[in-house]
Image: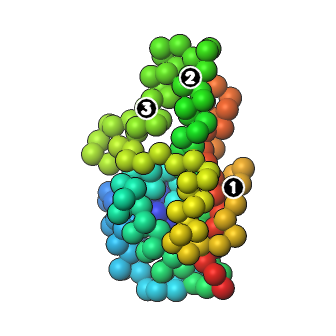
């Protein structure tokens, strides 16, 4: 199984889990509780611009523990989140005016268009890698892109990539 958490695009070979039902959703649920999926049954997990919607004290670690549990040994997590460090640099850049700062602020805190569109944690490379390592992931590395779906993992602002794309493995 290949699991796409928060997916809105159907792609052959992928099972879509989303908190909101829709025609492309196979499993309606929250990534903090993957009990509908057997331990060690997933080859790859893809989560693009989902994990920042989780609280950093309990929800994020719980979701990462659940992802680690469902991955088979050697399985791969591909996660994309807004890069807080880059967004902060863009926000304070002298050429960023009020309109640009408004748009950057929305990328930091979420668009807040509905109850699910709120960011509860800001992630940057060292912090995210540290959390993943603490949970038990190995071979953690930042990558330019995954090339799998048309989503926030390729987002730019003013030509600057603003997504932190991380590839990590479950120990084999």
For discs 1 and 3, the disc positioned in front in the rendered view: 1
Q: Is residue 133 above or below residue 84?
A: below
- Considering only order in the chain, which callout, 3 or 1, is on the residue closer to the N terminus? 3
Instruction: Examine the image and state in which quarter residue 109 appears.
Output: top left
Asked if residue 111 lies left or right of residue 49, the reply is: left
Q: Mark 1 to mark 2: distance in Å? A: 24 Å
Residue furthest left in the image: 115
Element on which disc 3 rests: helix
Asked if residue 22 lies left or right of residue 151, the reply is: left
Q: Which residue is mark 2?
A: 92
- Considering only order in the chain, which callout, 3 or 2, is on the residue closer to the N terminus? 2
Asked if residue 45 lies left or right of residue 53, the reply is: right
Nearest the eye: 60 or 102: 60
Q: Residue at x 39, y 69 (%)?
A: 62
- Considering only order in the chain, which callout, 2 or 1, is on the residue closer to the N terminus? 2
Q: Mark 1 to mark 3: distance in Å? A: 24 Å
Q: Residue at x 61, y 53 (%)?
A: 126
Label 2: how many residues lie within 10 Å, few (<14), some (14-19) or many (20+)? few
Element on which disc 2 rests: helix
Q: Which residue is mark 1?
A: 142
Badge number at residue 106: 3
Residue 44 place in picture, x, y as percent: 59, 73
Instruction: Examine the image and state in which quarter residue 17 appears.
Output: bottom left
In the rendered image, the quadrant that contains the C terminus is bottom right
For discs 1 and 2, the disc positioned in front in the rendered view: 2
Q: Is residue 73 above or below residue 122?
A: below
Q: Mark 2 to mark 3: distance in Å? A: 15 Å
Residue 21 place in picture, x, y as percent: 32, 59
């Amino acid at each position: 199984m290949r699991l796409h958490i928060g997916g809105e695009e159907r792609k052959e070979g992928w099972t879509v889990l989303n908190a909101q039902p829709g025609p492309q959703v196979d499993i309606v649920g929250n990534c903090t509780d993957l009990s509908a999926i057997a331990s060690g049954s997933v080859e790859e997990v893809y989560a693009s611009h989902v994990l920042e919607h989780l609280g950093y004290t309990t929800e994020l670690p719980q979701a990462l523990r659940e992802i680690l549990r469902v991955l088979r040994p050697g399985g791969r997590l591909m996660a994309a989140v807004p890069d807080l460090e880059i967004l902060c640099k863009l926000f304070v850049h002298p050429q960023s005016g009020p309109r640009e700062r408004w748009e950057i602020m929305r990328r930091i805190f979420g668009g807040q268009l509905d109850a699910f569109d709120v960011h509860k944690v800001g992630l940057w490379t060292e912090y995210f890698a540290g959390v993943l390592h603490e949970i038990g992931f190995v071979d953690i590395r930042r990558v330019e892109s995954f090339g799998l779906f048309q989503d926030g993992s390729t987002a730019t602002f003013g030509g600057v990539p603003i997504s932190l794309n991380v590839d990590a493995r479950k120990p084999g």
